[in-house]
Amino acid sequence: MTAVTPAPSSQPTTSRLLRGYFYLTLSMSLVGSYVALSKPLAAALPVLLLAWLRFGIGALAMPHWLAKPATEVPMTWHTKRLLFLESFLGNFLFTLCMLYGVSLTSAVSAGIIMATIPAMVALLSWVFLRERIGLRVWTAIGCAAFGIVLFALSKSEQLTQTGHGLEPYSIYKDAWLGNLLVFAAVVCEASYAVIGKQLTGVLTPKRITALINLWGFILMTPFGLYAAMKFDFLTVRPATWLLLVFYALAASVWTVWLWMTGLKTVPAARAGVFTVMLPISAALVGVLALGETLSGMQVLAFAIALAGVVLATLPAQR
């Protein structure tokens, strides 16, 4: 990424900001819901094949979004490079780092490291976008991070008390590598938000969504083909295929378009706070659809995280 100074523009109106907050909230909530509901997919399909099918279904769903609007200026090499980085970091590399990272470390460690996403987004937006970050936004980021950490710790304690906790940490012989990979995934996710903010200044959210999905499909095709040649597709039940379609549309189309639309009006640092909606919505889906329960400490953790969202959305004093 190269440092970019945003062109001077009029401040977005309150109604546009509220719409942006709504799009960001809906995007991360949808991410959390399909993450919670995609557990059967990961059990039925190899991960690399699942990722490849996701991008393929997404590409079939939005070919009309690839068309260049009449009002769009020709893309420069800088914009094309950002599009590739958006897909490579936010889709391809993030998936690999996260999947292999969580397999080598504990869920608690991964959750605590993932809590740094809002702060990492703020840091990168300050470095590359020259965004000014006030005390209130930093406080919101702190609440979001603390809430996620508290949730990760309380979840571990709850699992241990019910006899289904994680095995002793000594089994994670390569935990340091797993933690490093999860942190790399955090940097990828933060880069995704910052690069997306730059792209929304020159491309429409629909076109960004279609282009980065196409790059994701290209990057994942060699791995997907290799996994497909060794997989028996007849073992997949019809209900799993339906869930796969929902997962692909949500992950490749709906959530990306919502996120990019929200980024058009909301600063990247403030948008990063909304990532707390991911674990919150995932937990709610677990309670409502999968029969899981929430402890009092987890409810408190979510309340603190949501306080960060409220702080980030309060109107700034002029």
Image (cartoon, helix red, strand yellow):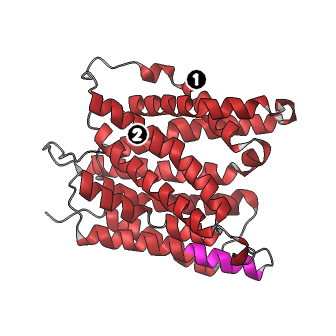
Where residue 101 appears, x then y in whole percent? 60, 59
Query: Whole-Å distance between the Cαs marked 1 and 2?
Result: 22 Å
Left or right placement of residue 188 versus residue 79 in this view? right
Q: Residue at x 46, y 45 (%)?
A: 89
At label 1, the amino acid type is Leu
Where residue 46 appears, x then y in whole percent? 74, 42
Quadrant including the N terminus: top left
Give the numbered dot on residue 85.
2
Q: Residue at x 67, y 81 (%)?
A: 157
Above or below, 167 relative to 92:
below
Other-residue count near label 2 (Cα within 10 Å), few / some / many at <14 / 14–19 / ≥20: many
Q: Which residue is mark 1?
A: 60
In this rendered view, identify the residue nearer to me: 96 or 62. Answer: 96
Left or right placement of residue 10 versus residue 149 in this view? left
Q: Residue at x 28, y 53 (%)?
A: 267
Question: Is residue 109 in view from this perspective?
Answer: yes
**To which quarter of the image does residue 168 belong?**
bottom right
The span picked out in magenta is 151-161
Other-residue count near label 1 (Cα within 10 Å), few / some / many at <14 / 14–19 / ≥20: few
Where residue 4 appears, x then y in whole percent? 21, 45
Above or below, 247 relative to 183:
above
**To which quarter of the image does residue 261 belong?**
top left
Determine if the magenta segment contains residue 234.
no
Above or below, 210 relative to 198:
above
- In terms of secondary structure, where does tag 1 sit? helix
Q: Residue at x 81, y 78 (%)?
A: 163
Determine if the magenta segment contains residue 158.
yes
Pointer 1 or 2: first along the chain:
1
